[in-house]
Image (tube, grey):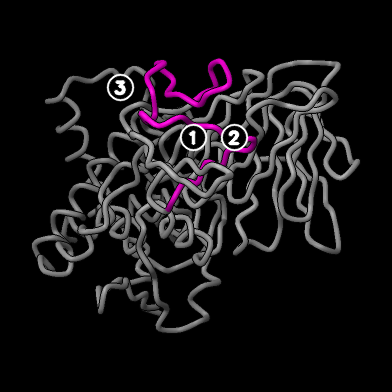
Amino acid sequence: MEQKNIAKILLKYELGVSSKEENKLIESWYNMQRPEHWSLDTAEQEDRKNKIFLGIQQQIAPKPMLRKPLYRKLGWISAAAAILLFAIVFLFNQTRQDQPDTRAAIDQFKPGQEKAILKLDNGSSFDLNGSKAGVKIVNGTPVYLDGSAISDAELQSHELTIQVPNGGQYQVNLPDGTKVWLNSASTLKYPLQFAAEKREVSLSGEAYFEVRKDPHHPFIVKSRNQEVKVLGTIFNINSYSNRQFVETTLLEGSVNVNQHRLVPGQRSLISNVSIQILPANIEAAIAWKKGYFLFDNEPLDQILATLSRWYNVEFEYESPSTKQLTFWGSIDKNQSLSKTLTFLESTDQLKFDYKNGKIVVHNKK
């Protein structure tokens, strides 16, 4: 078996779509290892990798079958990460050689960066400097986090709007000291000074909140179909309009979502007709803030919607049924789009092409 196919098997295992035979092969290899094997220098890693490839080469006979990934409960995450990194790079280099024009076209869509637009209630707007990392309020005036001025003009406004476009993210420190991280295609509206009885903001899109504690002034976030009320806590709200539900995930403290209380480790799913309180996957909910995306049995249309916002690119499906394919896996937000799509292509279920400024999604099954 070619090394290209072996690398695909490792990535299929990471994405949770490897066959029963592939699972047994990789896990039987793991069972033969001892923990001390994973403190390896570069030469030893290369030797170990070659032995893995040789073992897989001798045994593998693939048959597609969905499964739950197991590496999260095995004690080999650092080793698996090193091997999977090799597999991703190997597959990317092979694909880039096979389709140089397609990959070059896809890589015109760059990973997102720190950027946003500040809008005042008089209609004026200002592009925010990405190198300044965020904004805050000082003496009733919005400035960058380092204290430098946003503009030479006087910024007078009762309400401020921070709009993060596709391909961006940005931090906002509110007048009370609450910190907010905005994801791509998200908008936060808040007053220059909070009212005496409450602290209220409105959100569209996604944001991570670290609310400053103040038992006398509740903090309220209004978004699509919901109102979240807290005194001081850490939580994430995903209210993108393309999603069926608004999802609120609680990390610390407590919140009331439409008068339903969440405790840490819970999430609420709200539509215009229902509310559900469920256990949360904290890692998946806040991965975007930590520099990667984590998809937990996520449908393809949601995965590509996330990538569309981050890389500022449009996807087009050859067949609508492709949207319902589900995947599990983690993706570095800062890698090239072609590497990310190669990661998904490694499942042997998808193929991506570039056409007329869009990425076309093909179902290979």
How many other residues sit within 10 Å of disc 3, few (<14), some (14-19) or many (≥20)?
Answer: few
Q: Is residue 285 magenta?
A: no
Give the residue at mark 2. 208
Give the number of the disc on residue 37: 3
How many other residues sit within 10 Å of disc 1, few (<14), some (14-19) or many (≥20)?
Answer: some
Q: Nearer the viewer, residue 342 or 75?
A: 342
Look at label 1 and name its amino acid.
Lys
For marks 3 and 1, the one nearer the N-term is 3
Give the number of the disc on residue 289: 1
How many other residues sit within 10 Å of disc 2, few (<14), some (14-19) or many (≥20)?
Answer: many
Q: Dot 1: what SS?
A: helix
Look at label 3 and name its amino acid.
His
For marks 2 and 3, the one nearer the N-term is 3
Badge 3 vs badge 1, beta-carbon distance below 8 Å: no
Badge 2 vs badge 3, beta-carbon distance below 8 Å: no
Residue at (23, 20) in percent of width and height: 40
Residue found farthest to the right: 259
- The boundaries of the magenta stretch are 136-165
In what quadrant of the picture does the C terminus appear? bottom left
Look at label 2 and name its amino acid.
Tyr
